Image: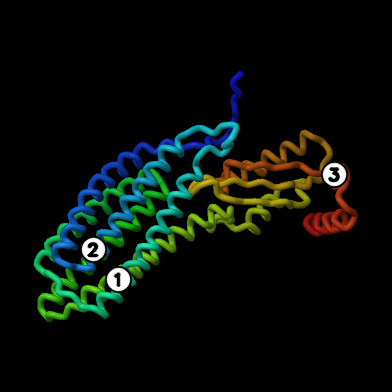
Amino acid sequence: MKKTYFHHIEHSKVQQQSKHTLWITLAITIFFTIVEFTGGILSNSLALLSDSFHMLSDVVALVLSMLAIYFAKRKPNSRFTYGYLRFEILAAFLNGLALAAISVWIFYEAIMRIVYPQQVESNLMIVIATIGLIVNIVLTIILMRSLKSENNINIQSALWHFMGDLLNSVGVIVAVLLIHFTGIQLFDPILSMIISIIIFRGGYKIMHNAWMVLMEAVPKELDTDEVIATIKSVPNVLDVHEFHLWAITIDQYSLSAHVVLDSQRSEDAYKSINQIEELLKTNYGLAHTTLQIEHLTINHLDDAYFNDIKEEARNKSR
């Protein structure tokens, strides 16, 4: 017999706009990655080659993001009761890790190019860089419009990537002009080093945000003490313990806690719990909460804890 699992919050996402945006972005990115890599080889430009590998990492990131969107819409089951929403966090972490690894490689190659200088074909380099600038402007606009309709961590990651690419394209054009007018070839590897630092910073930021979710840290926009104080402000609430607040994914948070009540009537207890849930939803957007009711005597809480709570309750009523 097939089992049915009931949830008062949907642990899945249908992100049609994000999916459409990523398909368009992926197609454009693959095309320009090939163009930029070919241009880098022909012009012997490390800056173009390094940016083409950055674009290649964007392709991988977009593929992972696509997979995350397809997984996210799958329903929870007996094995994965939260569904597959965490896949988008894993995808974001892998994207960030790939960016960091590529940036280290680019930095190393730039040092080698400084030690062993090579001639750069500036004319072809500026043509490719200009096309890259136009492509990145288009992709940035597409992603920004998508974020206005759907909040998605992988779309945010992609947007950060392409804004970085846009700045890189501007930097490459500046480097080409400097090489053309000064004849100093070192501008190419120096620019590559700057690009690698920008890429590494972006990769670290993405990894950090994903890591905080994977470690089930309290979301940065929420304050634990403030949330607990809000719960304690409800009548009959004596204390809150075993408190946990974490993110399932970028925009779905969960809270669980034991709430000690100063009432043995079940009707009063459920009224207090309902009031707490309404406050958490209204004040903090916490729709997925699990609250366990406890009583000082019924749950046999120890005497020291009992006396501390009673003293706090007396101070609260003054």
Cβ–Cβ below 8 Å for labels 1 and 2? Answer: yes
Q: Which residue is mark 3?
A: 299
Secondary structure at numbered mark 3: loop
The residue positioned 79% from the left and 34% from the top of the image is 266
Neighbours of disc 2 within 10 Å: few (<14), some (14-19), many (20+): many
Q: Name the residue type under label 2.
A: Leu
Task: Between residue 174 and residue 285, name the one nearer to us.
Answer: 174
Q: Tell me which numbered mark, 1 or 2, is placed earlier along the sequence.
A: 2
Label 3 and label 2: CA atoms lie apart by: 66 Å
Q: Tell me which numbered mark, 3 or 2, is placed earlier along the sequence.
A: 2
Q: Dividing the picture into quarters, in which one does residue 262 lie?
A: top right
Question: Going by the image, does 67 lie left or right of 244?
Answer: left
Task: Between residue 7 and residue 265, name the one nearer to us.
Answer: 7
Compared with 78, 115 (above or below) is: below
Q: Which residue is mark 2?
A: 49
Q: Position of residue 124 (x, y in %)?
A: 11, 64
Q: In this rendering, which labeled residue sits more in front, label 3 or label 2?
A: 2
